[in-house]
Image (tube, rainbow, N blue to C red):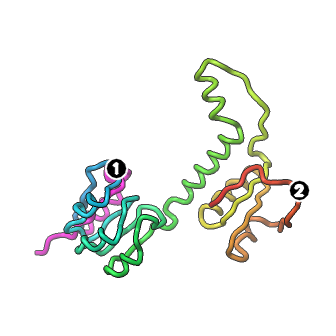
Amino acid sequence: MSAPLKVLVVPSLLANRPSPYLTHLETAGLEVQRSPLGRPYGEAELIEGLRGVFATVAGIEPYTERVLREATDLEVIARFGVGYDQIDVPAATRHGVYVAMAFGGNHETVADLALALMGAVARNVVTYHQRVKSGGWGWEFRQGLWRATVGIVGLGRIGRAVARRCRAYEMRVLAHDVVPGRCVDVVPKKVRAGEKGPPTAVLYC
């Protein structure tokens, strides 16, 4: 009987705690190896960690030409999230390594964070927090988010998720995207250049 294929799990968010996602891999007969570092791998560490590994659940560690050349058993790089800034995709193609993304896996939580940061800026939360910690008090007038105007540049998964949340606040949503027609169901009215009412906040999604 052949040995099970090995999967290296690098992101500490998965590697350092019980995860039903990893249990699925083990149930499928794969050998899951969790990163012991608790931080991203450097290039040399990654080369060593990928020895004998068939697939990796990748974080932000560098999958360079050198890494992919040395990792002769590697066949799959599955990003825990989206984006491949740290992966040399042409090199992966040359070495026959598939690169996969978790599209749709985190855009809702990123949109949650974007709205939380918008609220923190609109209500000056950081300044108030520091003032209270130092024993002070007081307040200042701030517009807040309710019925404010927001500009969203880019209506991919994150931008559209942010727009849905903004509309729940009855905000006036201005948006732009390079894909024609993507703004139609998010921004019901076309806004012409020079129209009054500049955005209270501009997000690049």
| Relative depth, front residue between 82 and 49 | 49
- State the SS at label 2: loop
Stretch in magenta? 1-28
Q: Residue at x 35, y 66 (%)?
A: 63
Q: Residue at x 65, y 31 (%)?
A: 127
Disc number for residue 196? 2
Residue found at x 76% / y 58%: 173
Tell whether position 8 is magenta.
yes
Residue 201 appears at what percent x and percent y? 73, 51
**Residue 200 inside the magenta-drawn segment:** no
Q: Nearer the viewer, residue 205 or 90?
A: 90
Q: Quadrant of residue 6?
A: bottom left
Q: Which amino acid does label 1 sit on?
A: Arg
Left-right relation of 155 to 187:
left
Q: Mark 1 points at which residue?
A: 39
* Quadrant for the C terminus in the image: bottom right
Type of amino acid at the residue the image marks with label 2: Lys
Q: In which quarter of the image is the N terminus?
A: bottom left
- Position of residue 180 relative to residue 152, above or below, is below
Marks 1 and 2, the one that precedes in the sequence: 1
